[in-house]
């Protein structure tokens, strides 16, 4: 986890930045699935500097050989006109750390009710009484719109970046997120 690659989106009059980031992230997810990777993390260094979205920069984190393996694959085909890609570089020695993870909202009361009916044997009326429509959770986090490689369904993938006191061990999922492992933050 001592190296990184920055992929910065170029301004495009035809496509808003969030749409290009969604496309870039989808390509990254597909290659991480293809490589069965668990050692590449991501961060969005510009996310806090804008009102909405994750910004125009995606940073990949990993060991130099792991990043080289990803960057040797042709996954950026079609994005070269829309993005500038840096060389693999060492992380600055004074970098801080943060967790980048997916956050899932409990936004569908019907799904929660069905789950409780199945788990606890509640009737629909009991479930509706315990879980009113007002229980829907709304997240105010930046998100990506991605399509699942397994189900083909599109969904919002909410992202939370939270500073940590230092590096933490763990693995990454095929989105480049981790519930335990931190990435360098600079």
Image: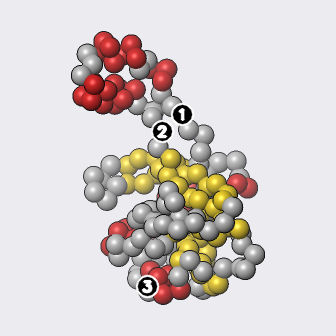
* Residue 5 in the image: above or below residue 155: below
Residue at position x 61%, y 55% in the image: 161
**Dot 2 or dot 3, earlier in sequence:** 3
Q: Position of residue 96 (x, y in %)?
A: 71, 68
The mark total stands at 3
Horizontal placement of 149 versus 76: left or right? left
Query: How crowded is the residue under tag 3: few (<14 C-alpha within 10 Å), some, or many (20+)?
Result: few
Q: Which of 157 and 94 lies nearest the eye of the viewer?
A: 94
Q: Which residue is mark 2?
A: 105
Residue at position x 34%, y 55% in the image: 148
Residue at position x 53%, y 86% in the image: 64
Horizontal placement of 57 versus 95: left or right? left
Q: Position of residue 153 (x, y in %)?
A: 33, 49
Q: Quadrant of residue 32?
A: bottom left
Residue 69 - label:
3
Measured in 3D between alpha carbons, the distance from the residue under mark 2 to the one under mark 3, in whole angstroms, is 34 Å
Q: Quadrant of residue 70?
A: bottom left
């Amino acid at each position: 986890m001592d190296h990184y690659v920055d992929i910065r989106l170029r301004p495009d009059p035809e496509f808003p930045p969030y749409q290009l980031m969604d496309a870039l992230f989808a390509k990254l997810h597909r290659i991480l699935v293809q490589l069965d990777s668990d050692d590449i993390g991501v961060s969005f260094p510009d996310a806090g500097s804008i009102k909405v979205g994750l910004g125009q920069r995606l940073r990949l984190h990993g060991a130099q050989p792991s990043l080289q393996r990803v960057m040797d694959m042709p996954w950026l085909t079609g994005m070269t006109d829309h993005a500038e890609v840096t060389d693999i570089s060492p992380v600055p020695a004074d970098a801080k750390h943060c967790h980048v993870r997916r956050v899932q909202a409990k936004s569908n009361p019907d799904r929660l009710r069905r789950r409780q009916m199945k788990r606890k044997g509640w009737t629909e009326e009991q479930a509706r009484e315990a879980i009113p429509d007002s229980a829907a959770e709304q997240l105010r986090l930046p998100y990506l719109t991605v399509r699942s490689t397994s189900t083909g369904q599109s969904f919002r993938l909410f992202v939370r970046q939270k500073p940590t006191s230092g590096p933490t061990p763990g693995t990454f999922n095929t989105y480049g997120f981790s519930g335990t492992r931190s990435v360098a933050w600079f």
